[in-house]
Amino acid sequence: MHQPLILQPTQSADSCVIWLHGLGADRYDFLPVAEALQTQLTRTRFVLPQAPTQAVTINGGMAMPSWYDIRAMSPARAINHEQLEASAQQVIELIEAQRDSGIDPARIVLAGFSQGGAVVLHAAFLRWQGPLGGVIALSTYAPTFSADLQLSDSAKKIPVYAVHGSQDEVVLTAMGRTAHDFLAAHGVAVSWQEYPMGHEVVPAEIRAIGTWLAARLS
């Protein structure tokens, strides 16, 4: 198992962002983004974990970095829930490691793109017990949110910044909106931002994320 990339700030760390890449990418995928954000977040550590390499059914069973197997695309994603749980547990352990290093969990933010976003939404709202600094959900969805799900009082206090491309053909915009609407209906402070893009990240989005993070961590 790969160790996460850890990007230390120029000053002593008092906050942390744990950022999960998408399907088929790796821990280096968001390194340039983390480096750019760290120029303004001079006391924030970035932790970039690596998904295990495993077979992905929808890609012909090819082995690639994936947080969980996707068995079918429609009508809703059919996924391997045990693998998602294992990935969420990895996130929980990263939170605990940062907490044990002296960083208040209320100053730890989880971020994830696409499949990575699904994992951080699950970890933050269904698995982690306690405060968190926030969640950044990028071009993602929430396969484990369901109508009968109840959120804990601490989970309801986690702010969420959801960003999606209006032209996303991989994770449809409606899938992101469904996750947003679920959180909003449960009293979570969730904001929604849409960009005229596909399944990607654009410079304007990174600047907006920097502003959102600075408001919570600076």
Image (cartoon, rainbow, N blue to C red):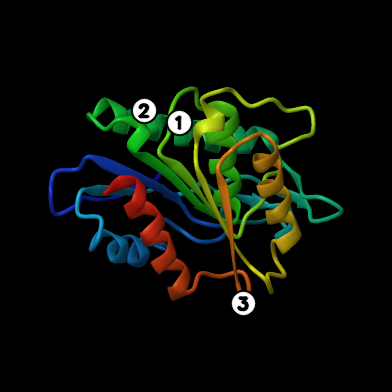
Assign a secondary structure to mark 1.
helix
In percent of the image, x 73 and y 50: which residue is there? 178
**Real-space CA distance between mark 3 and mark 2, rounded to the nearest whole angstrom:** 37 Å
Name the quarter where the N terminus is drawn. top left
Closer to the eye: label 3 or 2: 3
Assign a secondary structure to mark 3.
loop
Q: Which residue is mark 3?
A: 196
Where on the picture, by quarter, is residue 174? bottom right
Left or right side of 191 for 61: right
The answer to which of marks 3 and 2 sits earlier in the sequence is 2
Residue 50 picture location, percent across and down: 44, 49
Q: Which residue is mark 1?
A: 92
Q: Is residue 86 visible?
A: no
In percent of the image, x 43 and y 64: which residue is there? 208
Tag 3: amino acid: Pro
Residue 136 picture location, percent across and down: 49, 51
User: Up-down: is 19 above or below 37?
Assistant: above
Q: Which mark is residue 96?
A: 2
Residue 18 picture location, percent across and down: 39, 45
Asked if the residue under mark 1 is in contact with the one under mark 2, i.e. CB atoms within 8 Å, the reply is: yes
Front-most of 26 and 106? 106
Front-most of 185 and 117? 185
Front-most of 194 and 71? 194
Tag 2: amino acid: Glu
**Real-space CA distance between mark 2 and mark 1, rounded to the nearest whole angstrom:** 6 Å
In percent of the image, x 51 and y 25: which residue is there? 154
Closer to the eye: label 3 or 1: 3
User: Up-down: is 184 above or below 35?
Assistant: above
Left or right side of 172 for 95: left
In percent of the image, x 28 and y 41: which residue is there? 15
